Image (tube, rainbow, N blue to C red):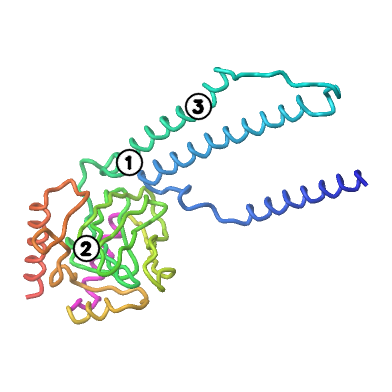
Amino acid sequence: MRKEHVNKMKRLFLFFVFTIVTVLTGCEPLKVLDPRGPQAERQADDIMLSIWIMLFIVIAVFAILVFMLIKYRASKLDKDYVPPHIEGSHLVETLCVGIPVLIIIFLSIVSVRSNYIVEATPKGYEDTKPLVVYASSSNWKWHFSYPEEGIETVNYLYIPTNRALEFKLYSHGPITSFWIPQLGGQKYAMSDMITTLHLAADTPGEFMGRNANFSGEGFAENTFNVTAMSQAKFDEWVKEVKETADPLTEDKFNELLKPGHLGQLTFTGTHLEFLPPPTPENGGHDHGSHKSMDDSDSELHETEHHHTGKEN
């Protein structure tokens, strides 16, 4: 009877291992572990470092568990065995407390350093002029305004490679979270302030972007497509949009803000001309930018004046 039970447990264990292996081999690679930019690469390295540390701890704990089960198993001891009275061990207590404390300190230092790195302009792009994109959300879509280029897209984003990207995030509705896993971590977009996110794409390709913060029934489809291309192709795309796309009017934008899902849309001009983002003057805040608010307001004012001159 005992032998049958052991065989049954072996078959169950093998089935369990086989199931895990087949499921994992059918999964797509995690996007966060397939970085295509310096910010995402730093975060992927931190994730893998944490995984290796946790894996070492798990293996060590299970090894000690197996050792204790074998060394002190009941069948090895005499029937009249009485365990000795032990007050405690300063060495064991020091190890049990000290090792977790050291691990926490180490991971805290790594996390703080990484936070400063990913919040700044991507490494290697400090001396280049970034592409500024105002990314705003509404139920349940994303609006991307290119103030320098004078164009706006809905639910898709074109970016040049090998150039710093500076996203100005805010929301026309509930709090959302802007996230392109292969380029960097997520950051909140709120209705009363601007948050700044610095990213860059090292290689051309197509990436998935989404809202990572629950914002109602349409949250699951609150996604957008990202295409990274060379600067020359990006300039060609901007030129083509200006020649073929319809202008974005205030009435049209108000229609776009209504709750619902849309496909990909392209316009000349931006909603920044008639509905500027939150600033201290209209009750908002600018958080996370390296520029002063006066500089940002001045640039936005110059952009609006330039666009108005072109339309006239």
Residue 239: give x, y in percent of width and height.
Answer: 23, 67
Horizontal relation, residue 308 to residue 93: left or right: left
Q: Secondary structure at mark 3?
A: helix
Q: Which mark is residue 146?
A: 2
> Residue 245 magenta-drawn?
yes
What residue would you read off at disc 3?
A: 97
Residue lying at 19% horizontally and 82% vertically, measured from the top left: 251
Q: Position of residue 101 (x, y in %)?
A: 45, 29
Residue type indicated by callout 1: Asn
User: Mark 3 or mark 1, which is nearer the start of the sequence?
Assistant: 3
Q: Is residue 88 above or below residue 265?
A: above
Q: Does the residue at mark 1 contact the one at mark 3 (Cβ under 8 Å)?
A: no
> Which of the two residues, 283 or 207, is positioned nearer the viewer here?
283
Q: Say whether residue 76 is left or right of residue 209.
A: right
**Left or right of 197 in this view: 45:** right
Q: Which residue is found at the position 28% from the left and 49% from the top?
A: 198
Q: CA distance from mark 1 to mark 3?
A: 27 Å
Q: Which residues are magenta?
A: 231-249
Earlier-in-chain disc, 1 versus 2? 1
Which disc is residue 115 wearing?
1
Residue 291 seen in the current view: yes
Residue 80 part of the magenta segment: no
Taking depth in this image into account, of 15 and 295 the one nearest to the observer is 15
Instruction: Give the structural element (helix, strand or loop) at label 1.
Output: helix
